[in-house]
Image: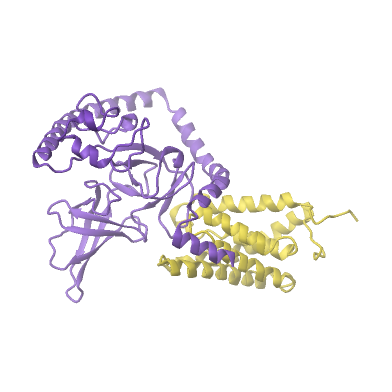
Chain colours: A yellow, B purple
Amino acid sequence: MMPYTTRTGTGAVVASFGIAIVLTILPLPEWLRYLRPEWVTLMVIFWSLAVPGRINVGTGWLMGLVIDILYGTLIGQHALALAVVSFITARLHQQIRIYPMWQQALSVFTLVALNQLLVVWVKGIVGQPPKTWFYWVPSLTSALIWPWIYIFMREVQRRYKVMDERTGT
Amino acid sequence: MVSVLLMIADHRVHYLESVRASLATIVYPVQFVVDAPVSMSNWLGDNLTTRATLQEENQRLRAEETVLKAQLQRYISLEMENMRLRRLLDSTTQLGDRLQVAELLAIDLDPFTRQVLINKGLQHDIYVGQPVLDADGIFGQVIHTTPLNSVVMLVTDPGHALPVHVNRNGLRAIAAGTGNNQKLELLYIPNNADIKAGDLLLTSGLGGTFPAGYPVGIVTEVTPDSTQAYATVYAEPKALLDQSREVMLLWTDKTLPPLGGEKLDAKLSAKAGAAAPASNAPAAAAPAPAVVLPAPIDIRNLPPGEVE
């Protein structure tokens, strides 16, 4: 058995978040923009699921802050939503991890929808609620893309040996 | 929780504008990386055009320039006449505006707001609330600035509204964004108001943010509704909100940053026409009766125009 530390593979985690951020602001054609999955939320969910000892509320909050800066939204709005999402995921990680894939996708749908709900809630308070139902489409696309993300990221995790004290793999 | 405190601080007090600016500098590399392929391909496209295309374009531009110059001559004389008449009436004189060209970055912001990122920021004296134009009309206004770039809210953003008037008869209205880039809604127009499809809307300058007299849109649809107090009126923005890659940032006389260590006071410059010019504006006053032309791009280095 190779000696793992809880620091191994931090580079892979940082890189995955970096790519997720780039995908978030990558210009897309107008009709595709509404379908864009919430990449950063997916990454936060995956890592909170895989290594809840290392990636949890703090990271979620930080990533949310980055999105707020990038989108020019109210500072703290996505931070709050992502912190809540990563908290729930880290709390339920043992349960969600053993779900079959379709059920996992369903939980991801719920989590991303919760994230969007918290964001739209703040937007509503500030007085700029989105006017179309298209707002909720990213939850759906995120859930649909989840199985592929999961399989791919699992491979990444194994290759770069991203572990924490609670991970059994 | 910290997030809630942050949100309240940002929304209510605007304390965080400087924090946002410094944090945005950290994410700038990401934005640069995303924008790079697009800028690169544009650059390549610019560099790899054939000689024939360039010559053709050169010819076309030269012809266009002649036409524009001819029009400009008339404009100058008109502007002079206008100022003379205004001075006779002893009303405030309109000064020329300073412009700077900025490029949009190929970065997608939140799809439910209409905002874009431009490549000029605090370093270029951009300020929050600054009007942004493109070649055809009012584009939007700056809402956040960072040292290297700024966020512009388009006129069609659901949170945007600007005061306009109908060019034909001076009817005042408020043009609010709808979230659809082809549509502005005119609020509080009475059912019997004299407005019809095809009317040109200009900025009225009443809000203080936008200078008066710039084109905003064309009225497309007027539906009087006798059961409601106001008619439903839609307009189409003049600016090519989906297509422009270059926009112009505008400084009006009141908001000009100090040039050459001297800040011109709007009141002083307004009086300058009547009183002796030398006493009011010593250094920055242009030697010739400088009329600053709003159209050409090259004027960004001119000092703020001073009226003789």
Q: Quarter of the image holding residue A96?
A: bottom right
Which quadrant is the C terminus of chain B positioned in? top left
Which quadrant is the N terminus of chain B positioned in? bottom right
Q: Is residue A103 visible?
A: yes
Apparent side of residue B27 relative to residue B158 in the rendered image (left or right)? right
Report x, y in % for residue A60. 63, 61
Report x, y in % for residue B126. 40, 42
Residue plotted at (71% across, 65% down): A49
Q: Quarter of the image holding residue B94?
A: top left
Whether residue A69 is situated above or below residue B100 in the rendered picture: below
Residue plotted at (66% across, 64% down): A57
Whether residue B51 is situated above or below residue A132 in the rendered picture: above
Report x, y in % for residue A112. 58, 67
Residue plotted at (48% across, 68% down): A122
Report x, y in % for residue A148. 66, 60
Apparent side of residue B76 relative to residue B123 in the rendered image (left or right)? left
Apparent side of residue A64 relative to residue B252 in the rendered image (left or right)? right
Q: Which residue, as the protein is rendered here, is positioned at the far right?
A: A1
Q: Which residue, as the protein is rendered here, is positioned at the far front?
A: B279
Residue plotted at (45% across, 60% down): B13
